[in-house]
Image (spheres, grey):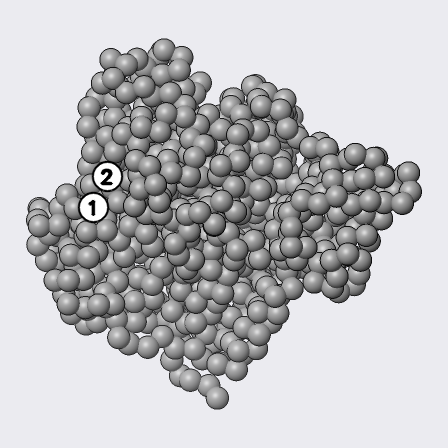
Amino acid sequence: MKSAKNCYAGKILRIDLTSGSINSEALEDDLVGPLIGGRGIASKILYDEVPPEIEPFDPENLLIFAPGALHGTGVPAASRTTLTCRSPLTHMHGDGHSGAQWGGELKRAGYDVLVIKGRAQKPVTLIIDDDRVELADADRLWGMLTSRTHTALRDETNIADLQTVCIGPAGENRVRLSAVFHNGADKGVNARCGMGAVMGAKNLKAIATRGTGDIGVVDIESLKAAYKEYVEIINTDPHPVGGTRYGTCRFMYHRVQFGIHGAENWNYGAYPWEKLDPEIFRSDYQIKAGSCVACPIRCRRDYRVVSGPFAGTTAKVEWETIARSLTCGIKEPEGVIAWANICNHYGLDIEGTGDTVAFAMECFENGIITAKDTDGLSLRFGDTEAFLEITRRIAMREGDLADTLAEGTKRAAETIGAGSERFAMHVKGGEMTAGDPRGMPVRAVSYATSTRGSDHLRSNPYIEEIMKPEEALKWWGSEEAADIAKGLKGKGRMLKFSEDLVTIGDILGLCKFAFYRSATFPWLYQKGVTLATRFYNACSGRNLSEEEMLLTGERVWNIEKAYNTRCGASRADDTIPQRFFKEALKGGGPSGGTVVDREKFEAILNEYYEDRKFDPQTGLQTRAGLERLGLNDVADDLAARGKLFGN
Amino acid sequence: MRIRVHLYPPLNNAAGRSRLEVVLDGDEDSLQALIDKMVEQFGDQFRKLLYDDRGRIVAGWCVFINQKPPVYFNQPDALATLLCDGDEISFLLALAGG
């Protein structure tokens, strides 16, 4: 039996904080058709409405909240909401993706997209309670931690299941490493690219939302059939099991065995990790195993310190929390949990903040920063007290050094100078994430080509680990693509595919771990393309092919690439920190002594550009490549700006 | 010969332990012999985690021998890799991305 209502609410809500105007407009087919939802629609709105003349903290910069098209439908792990703006960290396209209920609540209130521009004269909260949309004074909330902000709004409205997004003090202080938090400190986070600082610059403390409407599914039976196949795969695929048992902390084992920790500011591949064993976190610290909306894998973990100076401290901890702690030389769970607590409550992105602190630590170890600069903090790798205190100071911009670090690694290095630039580990201004790429050239290239600065979730080059040679031959034209150590041919094509692939997840609101990671390529494709398309068709009533779904991912990627080009990026920016090319990975282990081979890096990048229809010399897009995707308007805009190859 | 084995999730759950020692009969046994021995010892649940429904090792598994760069089961001759007495072997589901 078919229902008339589909998964779209059908409206965009627009708020101008300067004038106080509140308007809604129809979500037009010219956005939904080629871009579907979530990151797709948000990226196009940013491209169309925020040209490079608008600086990130300019009131005219937009904050675009866009739940994935399947958010709220009951499709498994369809929980992601994109937040997009021009990033104050990279000065390019910026977005962050959160798994939480708020996006579904926005849709139930009647809106697929929320676009905020302008700057309020004083702190405000946006309240969306179904049809009632209003701005309320937030003076009393300004300065509050994320957790208290959520609680205060919930108590004031007396709505127990109120969904909120908010910033903490870091966002208020325009810390370029600040994030936007959902339902307080320990739920979802739009983490990357400094979103919290843009929200702070707009004097927008929070958005409180309740929606009581329905989100439709056109073809329930087709959704059920796809759901059944999805469950069959995750019951067979060994990949989700570790996530269910340990949460994302599971990735520790991968880093240990490959020896790619990137500890002490990306110097050490092998590193003392034993006290951070996921089994220890599970047995000695775990207080809650939870999930995002509708996710059967349940990889969220809350931990509590039970003894010592941080006893009683709790926090949601992700693998990246542990990884970035190691980047700062922290080797004990107590320090990791206490640090996560500070970042989550003050409203900081753990990834950017961790790398920035690690940068400062390496400067301190080398005498570029001294105890005079730190007001007496011993900012050495592994010093937990200094680690926690400098993080708090960054959130509050307390003191000259913290104020400098609050600008992010790239700007901090430019300010500090004295050779510190060689310790600044970032791509396009976005700090490094995940594992060390030395010895794995396609991963190095994936960090370089990401459209929001260094990022491991912008693609899935890890599929080189799961493809059989015959599959690689069929898909990328060479068996070499399945060989991590020696392979070269086909890697660029594989990377391009994997970028388009995971973009589908952000468009639909599907979790990367639930849909875009598997132990075999057939399972990965079945979940990430075949079932994702079937889920979307069942919920929307459309009839997209798998090829059209992948093409949508490619279209969105090209919009973001064009945005960055328009902001001044070129092939020279598609690179990684020099340390990875020049300095051998320390610490021994399977990857010890390796560097990223520059020739391989460039060869993969060339193949990638060719497959993307970019000019390999300049990295510029071509008219033919953009028009193939229906992006004629983007091609015209780039041409007018002298940023299109051949024009 | 005696092989020291380290099993990562979810194989360790199926085996009920993370570390074990496996004794193989021959002097030049292969990785296949080691896997056969463990499947025999730990049963069907263990086998289902390692093999797909066509009887091939799931490609995402990889093996580290004495902490050297891994042997991937997506490579054709991986199972024929010869082991030596005293080798330390780790089984890891390689796909990363956290």
What is the number of callouts on the image? 2
Q: Is residue A1 above or below residue A339?
A: below
Q: Is mark 2 in CB contact (under 8 Å) with mark 1?
A: no
Looking at the rendered structure, the secondary structure element under dot 1 is loop
Judged from this view, the residue extending furthest toward the bottom is A1
Q: Quadrant of residue A516?
A: bottom right
Looking at the rendered structure, the secondary structure element under dot 2 is helix
The residue located at (32%, 77%) in the rendering is A214
Disc 2 crowd rating (10 Å Cα; few below 14, some 14-19, many 20+) is many
Q: Is residue A167 left or right of residue A453?
A: left
The earlier-in-sequence mark between 2 and 1 is 1
Residue A109: % across, % down: 26, 70
Residue A208: % across, % down: 20, 60
Q: Give the residue pinned by disc 1.
A: A145
**Mark 1 chain:** A
Q: Is residue A563 above or below residue A397?
A: below
Q: Is residue A167 left or right of residue A241?
A: left
Residue A159: % across, % down: 19, 68
Disc 1 crowd rating (10 Å Cα; few below 14, some 14-19, many 20+) is many
Q: B39 or A29, which lies in front?
A: B39
Q: A222 or A206, which lies in front?
A: A206
Q: Give the residue pinned by disc 2.
A: A170
* Amino acid at dot 2: Ala
* Amino acid at dot 1: Leu
The residue located at (13%, 46%) in the rendering is A142
Quarter holding the N terminus of chain B is: top right
Q: Nearer the viewer, mark 2 or mark 1?
A: 1
